[in-house]
């Protein structure tokens, strides 16, 4: 399912971007487990946008949906086929899904993840501009001495 792959790729992207911003790069885990990726991303987003007055409800809501998605398709192969290579059913407990509701929930997750992506990119750019200005200022002051 495209939504599942989008979430996995965006989580991996946020790990890279947050590492760049925090100057604490981390190897992106070589896993398809959304739960593993989400725990890293959540911790990093909370560090980047630390606010003691924030109740983190957006992260809580997105995390709840991401973890549900991970439980349905933990290895990124359950939404592709009704059975695994070993013959095991992939979705015996899923039941029926109402796609408009699923799409609406995933649109909310996508908006939160996209917001994190945009915010991190802007902050990385701003940090680079500030550092360049300080570097220029330091170089300029060196000529005056």
Image: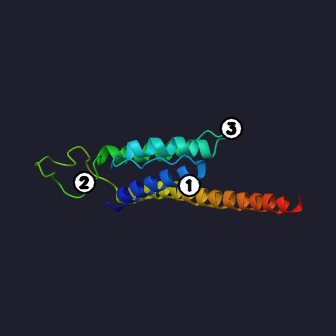
Image position, residue 99 (x, y; %): 35, 59
Image position of 64 (left or right of 122): left
Q: Could you tell me how far apart the alpha carbons at marks 1 and 3 are, in whole angstroms?
A: 19 Å
Image position, residue 139 (x, y; %): 79, 61
Q: Could you tell me how far apart the alpha carbons at marks 3 and 2 are, in whole angstroms?
A: 39 Å
Image position, residue 142 (x, y; %): 83, 59
How many discs mark residues in the rendered view? 3
- Helix, strand or loop at disc 3? loop
* Residue drawn at 11 percent across, 48 percent down: 86
State the residue position of label 1: 116
Which one is in front in this view, the residue at disc 3 or the one at disc 2?
2
Image position, residue 54 (x, y; %): 65, 40
State the residue position of label 3: 53
Image position of 74 (left or right of 130): left
Which one is in front in this view, the residue at disc 1 or the one at disc 3?
1
Q: Residues within 10 Å of mark 2 (few under 14, many from 20)?
A: some
Residue 77's disc number? 2
């Amino acid at each position: 399912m495209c939504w599942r792959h989008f979430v996995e790729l965006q989580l991996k992207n946020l790990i890279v971007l947050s590492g760049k911003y925090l100057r604490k790069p981390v190897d992106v885990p070589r896993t398809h487990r959304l739960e593993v990726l989400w725990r890293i991303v959540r911790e990093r987003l909370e560090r980047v946008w630390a606010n003691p007055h924030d109740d983190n409800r957006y992260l809580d809501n997105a995390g709840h949906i991401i973890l549900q998605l991970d439980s349905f398709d933990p290895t990124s192969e359950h939404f592709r086929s009704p059975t695994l290579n070993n013959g095991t059913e992939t979705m015996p407990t899923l039941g029926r899904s109402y796609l408009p509701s699923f799409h609406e929930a995933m649109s909310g997750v996508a908006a939160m993840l996209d917001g994190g992506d945009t915010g991190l990119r802007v902050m990385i750019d701003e940090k680079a501009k500030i550092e360049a200005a300080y570097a220029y200022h330091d170089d300029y002051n060196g000529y005056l001495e």
